[in-house]
Every structure is written in structure tokens, then in C-alpha cells.
Amino acid sequence: MILVTGASGNLGSATLAALRARGADATGGSRTPRGGMRLLDFDDPAGVDLAGVSTLVLVSAGYAEDDRVIGRHAAALDAAARDGVQHVLYTSLAGAGDHLGFALAHRATERLVRACGLPWTILRNGLYAELFGGLLMWADGALESAFGDGALAAVARADLAEAAAVVAADPAPHGGRTYDLTGTPVTAAQVADGLGVPHRTIGLGEYRRRLDAMPQLLPFQPPMLVSIATGIRHGFLDGTGPDLAGILGRPVRDPLATAVTAAAAAMRR
């Protein structure tokens, strides 16, 4: 059986759906399980049960400080080794993202995966096209961003979910492999053009000020978001490659269309 962690989240639920669409024997695990999912709370390592799981799709357990995220991943890998899991697939961060504010937890987890004693595959996911569109800000009928003229090799979340499902359904050929799953470069100006509105660039200081004024953000999130903005703005996240299309066996989805849809949805909120 294949088990997908974080199956109540966006990537985990999409991966589980893609596996089931392929006819795979798959279930989900979550701290908030539903629909027959397995209860998995990596903050309670003693209670993590992976018995009967042949392939573990470990979706990164973010939304916390690095030490807590890494601890959660370590608990999952310890349980996988103890309970006889035969292959671990970890959804990491694209190689170009090494300088981002959330890269350390991913790279530390990659070390744990390689040292866990089990066959493994690492999918280094590019940033979502949905995220790129959702981070654009609406003001007076225009889109504003701190991205400048920089581009992001964004990826539709559905492509990343499908790639994870392809590998998890037949993991042996992918053992010991690290894939960089990036899309085609997209700019904020292109998204604005797709919506028929202007794009205005703001400085990183102004962007940080706006983020600091958002009470819904957790303390560690504004620095992470600023790191994305400066990475895009200065050309560190626009590199693409063949790995994603190679796994999918088809061209990747158009990330611009996905980003435009996300930006339009943000306008309606």
C-alpha cells in the first residue's frame, strides 16, 4: 500500500487523487484525517503507525520553524524504518531554492532520507504557479509585486502531484534519484497582461512592511515570503529543466494560465 502524508493539504490530497486515478492501492495520512485516512501526527512520534505501508510519500510538513519541521520528518522516517516501509519518496524544494528562507529544513530532511537505510527518491519541487499568482497584490485596478522583472520557473501543483503519483506507483526505477521538477519561467508582467491590467513593482522594504502588517501571517512567514520575492527579482529562480516532463511523459501544464487564474481568485477575496 502507498501512503501519502499531509493528505488533507493541497499537494497531498492531489497526489492521493492522482494515485487513485491510476488504480493504485493508496491511502492518506493526516493530523486531521477524513474519508478513511490514517491518523498521523508527527508531533507525537510514539503514535506514528506505518504498518502495512510499502511506499511512503512524505509530503513536507511545513508551517513551522525549521527545528519542528525537521523533527516531524525525522519521526516519519524513523517510523518508516521501524515498520518495514520499502521505499520513501520525499517532496523537497527545487535546487535553485537553496537561498530561500525555508530551504534549510528541506536540505536537512534530504540528508535524513539518504541516511534512513531505505530505498528513496527525492522530488525537488519548483514553487507553485498558484503561489506565484496568489502573491501578486491588487491595488487600484493594477497588480503589484516585489518581483520586478524577474521570472519564476513555476509549476502547476497538479503536475507535481501527478509526478509524485507516477514515481510512487512504480518506485524501483527511481531509487536513489533526485529530480528537479521546474516549469517554464513566468513574470508578474505576463500575469498582469493575461488579466488585462498594469503591473507595478514595489521595493522589498515596502513588501516587508505590508507583510508585517498582516496579522494572519505567522512570525516565520514574512521572511520566507521576502526571500521568494528577492530570489525572483534577482533572477535566481528562473531556471528550468527536463525532469518533470520526463517523469510525466508529456509537456508540463502552462504555468502562466494557472498563475493568472490564481491572481484573479485573489482579486475576488
Image (cartoon, helix red, strand yellow):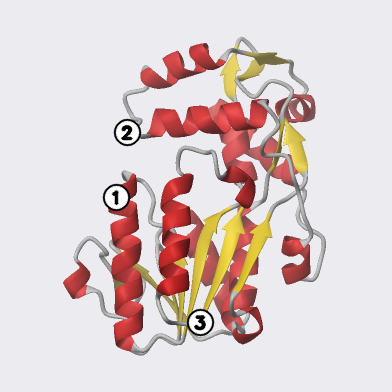
Does residue 148 appear to the left or right of 24 in the view shown?
Answer: right
Task: Give the x, y percent position of residue 202.
Answer: 60, 13
**What's the mark number on residue 119?**
3
Q: Quick one: SS at disc 1?
A: helix
Q: Nearer the viewer, mark 3 or mark 2?
A: 3
**What's the mark number on residue 213?**
none
Q: Is residue 226 above or below residue 140?
A: below
Q: Is residue 218 above or below residue 251?
A: above
Q: Give the Cα distance between marks 1 and 3.
A: 25 Å
Circle 2 residues within 10 Å: few <14, some 14–19, many ≥20: few
Q: Amino acid at mark 2?
A: Leu
- Residue 159 in view of the camera: no
Q: Quick one: SS at disc 2?
A: loop
Q: Tell me which numbered mark, 1 or 3, is placed earlier along the sequence.
A: 1
* Front in this rendered view, residue 151 or 260: 151
Q: Which residue is mark 2?
A: 218
Q: Amino acid at mark 1?
A: Asp
Q: Tell me which numbered mark, 3 or 2, is placed earlier along the sequence.
A: 3
